[in-house]
Amino acid sequence: MTSKQLEDLVRLWQGRLGLEAWRLHIEVADLDEATYFARAEPTKTGDEARLTFPPWVLGRGQRPSNVLPAFEGEIEATVVHELLHLVLRDLDWAMEMLEGQLHRDLDSVFKTSLNQTTERTIDRLAWALVRSWPRAT
């Protein structure tokens, strides 16, 4: 996949998910953890975010050995997954408002459970959406 193809894919799904008003900055850079396919980082103010993809997504460098083997549609599903994080941004902010309000034991369990549940839910939604629309080319 080329940088242009990646950007086109992001822009296509940005429109499909109703994020047209968002200013998205797409970059290719190493991520902190090699298991990540990508990362979405929304700003705290306004509808703006940075989407970061590791170089191996564009065929630069080696795919890390701890990342699952390649499968059809993985990059498109990853793009949708990251954009869904932006769609759900306000829920994340609402959860952040609980920071420091819960007992420390409950806080830890709550954050871990919420994070795992959110990621699994977003994965299922991303795959359902990718299967529901014609594949991007």
Image: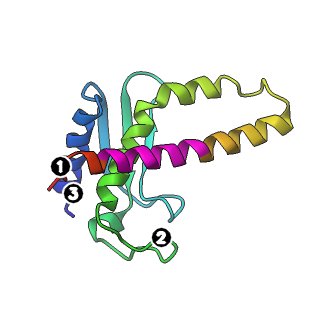
Residue 126 colored in magenta in the image: yes
* Image quadrant where residue 107 sits: top right
Image location (x, y in percent) of residue 4: 16, 54
- Residue 62, compared with residue 51, is above or below; it is below
- The amino acid type, in three-letter code, at marker 1 is Pro
Q: Secondary structure at mark 3?
A: helix
The residue sitting at 78% across, 23% down in the picture is: 101
Colour mapping: rainbow
Range of residues picked out in magenta: 117-129
The residue sitting at 28% across, 28% down in the picture is: 18
Image location (x, y in percent) of residue 129: 32, 44
Q: CA distance from mark 3 to mark 2?
A: 21 Å
Q: Nearer the viewer, mark 3 or mark 2?
A: 2
Marks 3 & 2, CB-CB < 8 Å contact: no
Badge 2, how many Cα within 10 Å: few under 14, some, many 20+?
A: few
Q: Nearer the viewer, residue 75 or 24?
A: 75
Disc ID at residue 3: 3
Q: Nearer the viewer, residue 5 or 16?
A: 16
Which residue in the protein does label 2 denote? Answer: 67
Magenta: main secondary structure: helix
Badge 1, how many Cα within 10 Å: few under 14, some, many 20+?
A: few
Image location (x, y in percent) of residue 99: 71, 28
Which residue in the protein does label 1 denote? Answer: 134
- The amino acid type, in three-letter code, at marker 2 is Val
Q: CA distance from mark 1 to mark 2?
A: 26 Å
